[in-house]
Amino acid sequence: MSPTATSLFDATARPNPAGHRDLDVTALPVPAPDGVTLIDVREPHEFVGELGHVPGATLVPLATVPAQSVTWDKNRTYVVICRSGGRSGQAAQALTRLGFSRVINLVGGMLAWNQAGLKTEK
């Protein structure tokens, strides 16, 4: 059975004290399940740089997340990605503060994704 947005959020991702959830790179299915949006919060040159990006991810640089998110569905599941997990953790906290209820930080970011040998796009 393929994963769903609900199973990814509720059963797979671990609660974080900041209000979002954390997910190991090996637990993120690609393509993402229906109802899951992948948000990469790095800068444009990083998104297409040597680490690449997760297939299907949308680039939304960290500084633009609050403004961009005003049009997003607050009940959808969002997986936030960066280089190492720091900026995506900040974005996950910001989205949680803005009222998003299903936010996941990809732990270790693209460094961990590449180390695990997972597919990327550039």
Image (tube, grey):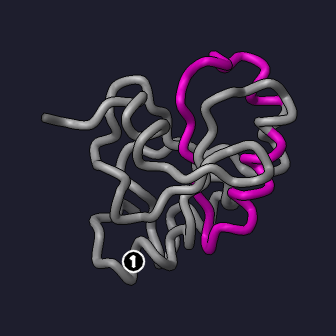
**Residue 42 image offset from top left, x and y in percent:** 67, 60
Residue position for label 1 = 114
Viewer-nearest residue: 89 or 69: 89
- Residue at x-position 32% and y-position 30%: 4
Residue lying at 74% horizontally and 62% vertically, measured from the top left: 87
Give percent across and percent down for residue 40: 59, 51
Name above or below for residue 6 compared with residue 73: below
Q: How many marks?
A: 1
Quadrant in the picture for residue 68:
top right
Q: Secondary structure at mark 1?
A: helix
Q: Is residue 17 above or below residue 45?
A: above
56 above or below 66? Answer: below
Residue 109 figure quarter: bottom right
Q: Residue at x 34, y 25 (%)?
A: 34
Q: Is residue 106 above or below residue 79?
A: below
- The N terminus sits in image quarter: top left
Check residue 8 for magenta coloring.
no
The amino acid sitting under disc 1 is: Asn
Q: Which residues are magenta?
A: 67-94
| Residue at the image position 44 percent from the left and 67 percent from the top | 52
